[in-house]
Amino acid sequence: MKNCILILLILITGCSRENINSEIKYRLGSYGKFIETMQPDSLAQFYLPQGSLSGQGESPIVGPKAIAKHLKQFIDFTVLEYRFTTDSIYTRGDTVLSNGSYFQKVIVPTKDTLALGGKIICKWMFDNQQWKIQSMFTYDYRDLKQRSR
């Protein structure tokens, strides 16, 4: 009987971890759709009240209002393509760490087209019945190339 209970607990834990991974991937996909359509207010809603967004060499932008304000600087950019690939997801209690790669092609207001890509490290916390971003850190491949010289 004890072995059956232990096996059942292992199965339940495994299923819940798969559900968490699926939910995080779904949330990242939704985040990407809001990037494609350049919706700063919707993107900001993914963050916890103390959530932060930062990139290599930048100070963190903290809180949904500040994040929305920052992202509104890019409202005149046209996203032609956005892809996100999840490389790994680690779960511990109510915290998840996801790592991935992104690529985006955008037309900037001067009508130039830029292709950008890099890595994203994102810490998620379960809050108010959903996964929210505690911190998102990005660095692009150009930074990696410059550092390797």
Image (cartoon, rainbow, N blue to C red):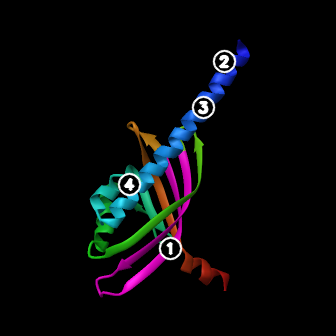
Q: Are marks 4 and 1 in contact (CB under 8 Å)?
A: no
Q: Position of residue 105 (x, y in %)?
A: 41, 76
The residue indicated by pointer 1 is 117
Decide: few, some or many residues near mark 1? Use Cα within 10 Å; few <14, some 14-19, many ≥20.
some
In three-dimensional space, the C-alpha distance between marks 2 and 1, rounded to whole angstroms, equals 47 Å
* Residue nearer the viewer, 47 or 34: 34
Decide: few, some or many residues near mark 2? Use Cα within 10 Å; few <14, some 14-19, many ≥20.
few
Q: Tell me the kind of residue under disc 4.
A: Ser
The residue indicated by pointer 2 is 5
Tell me the residue at 48%/63% (across/down).
84
Horizontal arrangement in the rendering, residue 143 relative to residue 42 (left or right): right
Q: Tell me the kind of residue under disc 3.
A: Thr
Asked whether 127 falls inside the magenta stretch, the response is no
Tell me the residue at 30%/76% (across/down).
77
* Residue nearer the viewer, 29 or 39: 29
| Secondary structure category for the residue under label 3 | helix
Sequence order check, earlier mark of 3 and 4: 3
**What residue range appears in magenta?**
96-124
In three-dimensional space, the C-alpha distance between marks 3 and 2, rounded to whole angstroms, equals 12 Å
| Secondary structure category for the residue under label 4 | helix
Q: Position of residue 109 (x, y in %)?
A: 28, 83
The residue indicated by pointer 4 is 30
Horizontal arrangement in the rendering, residue 7 relative to residue 38 (left or right): right
Sequence order check, earlier mark of 3 and 2: 2
Sequence order check, earlier mark of 2 and 1: 2
Horizontal arrangement in the rendering, residue 23 relative to residue 64 (left or right): right
Q: Are marks 1 and 3 in contact (CB under 8 Å)?
A: no
Q: Is residue 43 above or below residue 75?
A: above
The residue indicated by pointer 3 is 13
